Image: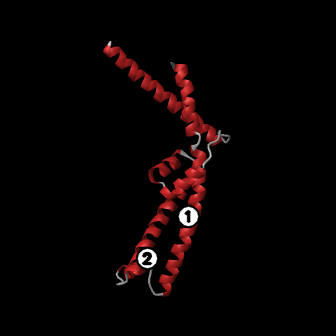
Amino acid sequence: MQRLFAVLSLLGALLVAQIPELLQQYRQRLGGAADELTVIVRNFDEDSRRSGYDRSSALGVMAKNPEQLVRDQAQRMTEYVRRLDRLSEQQLALANGVTPAAVLAVAVDYDKPIMAQAWSAHAPALPTTLTGIAFAIIGWCLSYAALLLLGAVVNSRTRVTT
């Protein structure tokens, strides 16, 4: 049974080994999105200053405007600023490469559109980097441990019922 578990754990190893490459795709797309949002927000801030407002005041003026279009633009700009803040946090988390902390940060609060694009562009491959190999080993160990635990639970239930 342990040999079967060891072989089945290879699947877990191959799956977990994909994490570094997927996060690299995500990181590249994240950078592009953050760069574009930075330009949009910076332009808004410059326009606001020329009109005598800071960002918050300008958004407040726009939010109270009688025109629906202007109110909608205030809401959209607020969403852009929030998204840029989230993307910047993710960039910081990924700045040191694919680490357990970076994986956790992305897993907890990834940007859905960016992750969808990264996932669709990702092509699974055998790991050839040290990070990929390390993740494969971790994946194998986690899979093997999970299968051993599952086997022990099934085995103990079988003994109790007989």
Q: Quadrant of residue 39?
A: bottom right
> Residue 114: x percent and y percent?
53, 57
Q: Quadrant of residue 140?
A: top right
Q: Which mark is residue 33?
A: 1
Say few, some or many: other residues with alpha carbon within 10 Å of mark 2 (under 14 / 14 to 19 / 20 or more).
some
At label 1, the amino acid type is: Ala
Q: Which is nearer the eye, 128 or 1?
A: 1
Residue tagged by mark 2? 73
Q: Tell me the CA gap for discs 1 and 2.
A: 19 Å
| Residue at 52% across, 24% down | 5
| Residue at 58% across, 48% down | 22
At label 2, the amino acid type is: Gln
Q: Secondary structure at mark 2?
A: helix
Q: Secondary structure at mark 1?
A: helix
| Residue at 68% across, 40% down | 128
> Residue 82: x percent and y percent?
44, 66
Q: Could you tell me if residue 124 is visible in this image?
A: yes
